Amino acid sequence: MSTHKSLYIDTEALSTLALVQAGLISPVDKLMNQKEAKEVDETKFYQGVPFPFAFVLAPRGKQNHQILQSLKKGEKVDLINEGQKVGELTVDETFPIDPNQRLNNIYGTSDAAHPG
């Protein structure tokens, strides 16, 4: 049995991580660090290639939030989807994400009534 902390991710996050692992979201080949995420959100470019928004993992939920706040560089964390371990990440860094700003970066608005 794993002694790692666990993050609970939805199927959409799992699918997106699988696309990155398979090399299908070029030039992204990993989760972005804070500096890269900020640059993409400000310029809409990643490694010189147009990219719509930062590629970060920000799973919802109070338990995930608490785990994310406790993680340290180099620590391993299990990824859980529908009760099953589906992967493992090694932490490079964690950083706060403003949910309203994230919505604005993705949809161009943080209005909850937006259909996206």
Image: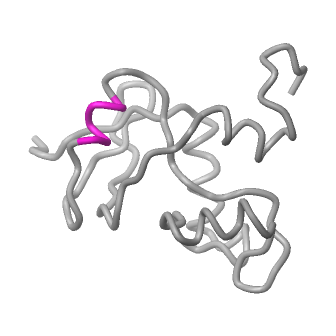
The residue at the point 56 percent across, 39 percent down is 98
In this orientation, which residue lies closer to the viewer: 7 or 115? 115
The residue at the point 29 percent across, 46 percent down is 78
In this orientation, which residue lies closer to the viewer: 78 or 62? 62
Q: In this view, does 57 lie above or below 83?
A: below
* Horizontal relation, residue 114 to residue 21: left or right: right
The picture places residue 108, in percent across and down from the top left corner, at: 87, 40
The picture places residue 88, in percent across and down from the top left corner, at: 33, 55
Q: Is residue 90 above or below residue 16?
A: below
Spot the residue most to the top.
113
Task: Please provide the residue range marked out in magenta.
Answer: 64-69
The picture places residue 87, in percent across and down from the top left corner, at: 38, 51
Q: Is residue 74 above or below residue 109?
A: below
> Overall secondary structure of the magenta stretch?
helix
Count of picture labels: 0
* Horizontal relation, residue 96 to residue 26: left or right: left
- For the C terminus, the quadrant is top right
Q: In this view, does 53 lie above or below 47?
A: above
- For the N terminus, the quadrant is top left
Q: Does the magenta stretch include residue 100?
A: no
The picture places residue 3, in percent across and down from the top left corner, at: 9, 44
The residue at the point 78 percent across, 74 percent down is 45
The colour scheme applied to this rendered structure is one colour
Task: Say which quarter of the image contains residue 47.
Answer: bottom right
The residue at the point 52 percent across, 63 percent down is 31
Task: Say which quarter of the image contains residue 113.
Answer: top right
